[in-house]
Amino acid sequence: MAGASLLTLLDDISLILDDVSLMTKVAAKKTAGVLGDDLALNAEQVTGVRADRELAVVWAVAKGSFVNKLILVPAALLISTIYPPLVTLLLMCGGLYLAYEGAEKVIHKFWPHILPHDEEQNARLRANADDTVDLVAFEKQKIKGAVRTDFVLSAEIIVIALGAAAGATLLEQSLVLAIIAIAITVGVYGLVAAIVKIDDLGLYLMKKSGNVKQKIGGFLLAAAPKLMKFLSIAGTLAMFLVGGGILVHGIDFLHHEVEDIAHLTGVFESLTTMLLNGLVGLIIGVAVVAIVTVIGKMRNKDQDSSAAH
């Protein structure tokens, strides 16, 4: 009897693992697009960090990402069990945050006089140029911002994965989310670490003997800054695409309008949908930046008035 019970248990475990494996593959396919955005955004987050501190910053953000997953996985399971509509509401807040961050970056880049001066960025640039300054203190804010952005993207990935496992048992859902969470964190930050050290690899190969190695090294050295610039642009675009996509899917009339317009373009429907999502993200992001800026100026005026009295 004991042997039969053990075989039954092993058979049940095997069936669960097969189901989990299938659902994990489906979830991985559905989250592939978001993973690309996640990679671009996180690689962009370490731009401006001094070379000898890049891996330390990536590792710090990766640890924050693991903490995010430890919070998000059980929270998603709990919320989906108790009150599923709350998941959508939280995602909408995340979409607003991404759209706001993207709009702020664009405005700071092209119209810096519109927004308050970014003292934190200037302080970090001065610190990068001064070998006597402890960069850890200046990196903390950058790391916090990267971890916040990771939280939003991770939340979307977890929710998409949860949707792929809809109808499964709680145990199967938990396993699928745990596997996806670990895999994306290791994969994304492993790639980010590799990307930011491309220039170091190029320099290493340049010092080696052999014409082929030196040519490869020269190519990597030339390509590294261009790749980082591309990832910086792609990361900002991803904020609009992902944030706008979340907002469009969460607002029914917008969702229907975008679908109707995109459907008119025929074979370009998917591309049109993506571009419209990005446009919505940009417009809403600019609106949120305007609101936040006005509120900030009003608070500063109130504080100045209080100080004067």
Image: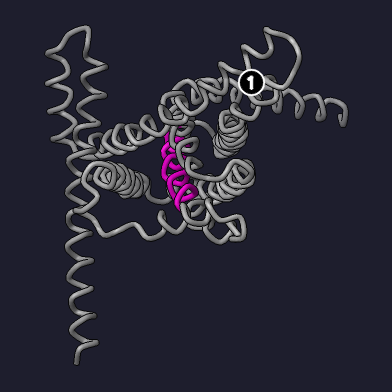
Secondary structure under tag 1 reads: helix
Residue depicted at x 59% and y 46%: 57
Decide: is 109 above or below 265. below
The verdict on residue 154 being magenta is: yes
Other residues around mark 1 within 10 Å, as few (<14) / some (14–19) / many (≥20): few
Which quadrant holds residue 273?
top left
Residue depicted at x 44% and y 42%: 155
The verdict on residue 204 being magenta is: no
Residue depicted at x 23% and y 73%: 300
Residue 12, percent across and down? 69, 26
Name the residue carrying label 1: 18
**Direction from residue 32 to residue 51 in the image, left or right:** right
- Quadrant occupied by the N terminus: top right
State whether the magenta stretch is mostly helix, strand or loop.
helix
Q: Which residues are magenta?
A: 145-160
Residue 85 at least partly seen: no
Decide: is 118 above or below 65. below
Q: Amino acid at mark 1?
A: Asp
Residue 70, percent across and down? 58, 48
